[in-house]
Image (spheres, rainbow, N blue to C red):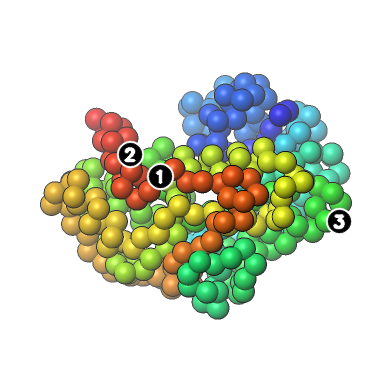
Amino acid sequence: MGTTLITGAYGQVGQELVPILTRRLGREKVVLADIASPPERFRDYPNHRLDVTDRATLEKVISEHGVDHIFHLAAILSASGEKNPARAFMTNAIGTHNILEAARELSVKKVMIPSTIGVFSRETPRRNVPVNTIMKPRTMYGITKVTGEMLGNYYFQKFGLDVRGVRFPGLISYSAPPGGGTTDYSVEMFHYAVRKEKYACYIDRNTVLPMMYMPDAMKAMMALFDADINRLRFHSDYNISAFSFSPLQLEEVIRKRVPGFTVTYAPDYRQEIASEWPETIDSSDAARDWGFRAEYDLDSMVDDMLMNLTKKER
């Protein structure tokens, strides 16, 4: 594995991925790019302020470092995207096209582009959703992520560019703050519980959504990156998920460990987004093709989140 560029490196997923790639490659081979300034712990990496809609600068960074692989994480998430859909379109659609074109022209070997359950819609089956299904998303995030999946598959079929991606469910992490997604309530709830504060949830208490703990998400992405291409029946659109729960179910599991923790419910515009998404998705193709398996269930995830957030609060 050669020099690797991470776009959106300082987001929730990027901050988890950087240490993993560092252990594989060493700091000098992990190039970080983001529109934000680097956190203190990342300042001794090769890093660039980069807007992925700026094609010329993107190509300069790839050429300067002799980039072999790209993890394209730069994106405007679902809730933030509805506040500024024009920006979401430019970043998610035009930015992804720029990544693929630059990778093709500059002979990048492999591009990883995560997708999302946001590609699904009310027409999608509610349970056990397969990889190939009806997708009519009504958010700019979902629309641009479907576009990204199709572009990735197109660049593989048309140009032989090795593009791979998983559809992430809601991701839960203690390492970095949430980044504007609809499922961020699940992370916020833990922070309030550890501080012994009441939490006001913006999603209806009974809305069930697919979720995953970040360590499993990182293992999945790296497993797909390492997989033999000849075993892959899909490329940019593998389903993965670990468990599903509603806000009320999460509240109850947390309260068993944090007695007295309470949550109120006042659904806002994000409830309409969440209502479009299925309750469970079928990850069997990922398991068959490249050995996907989630290790954390709901209870073990809650235990680990509370333990690590409690340490951070001290």
Q: Is residue 219 left or right of residue 4?
A: left
Residue 159, given in percent of the width and then of the height, sits at: 86, 51
Q: Quadrant of the C terminus?
A: top left
Q: Is residue 216 above or below residue 243?
A: above
The image shows a total of numbered marks equal to: 3
For label 2, the residue is 304
For label 1, the residue is 296
Q: Amino acid at mark 2?
A: Asp
Q: Amino acid at mark 3?
A: Lys
Give how far apart the Cα atoms at labels 3 and 2 are.
44 Å
Q: Which mark is on residue 158?
A: 3
Residue 61, given in percent of the width and then of the height, sits at: 74, 35
Give the class, few, some or many, for how many residues have Cα within 10 Å of label 3's Cα (few <14, many ≥20). few
Is disc 1 in contact with disc 2, using a CB cutoff of under 8 Å?
Answer: yes
Q: Residue at x 67, y 45 (%)?
A: 112
Q: Is residue 84 above or below residue 225?
A: below
Give the number of the mark in front: 1 or 2.
1
Q: Residue at x 55, y 74 (%)?
A: 124
Q: Is residue 247 above or below residue 107?
A: below
Q: Quadrant of the N terminus?
A: top right
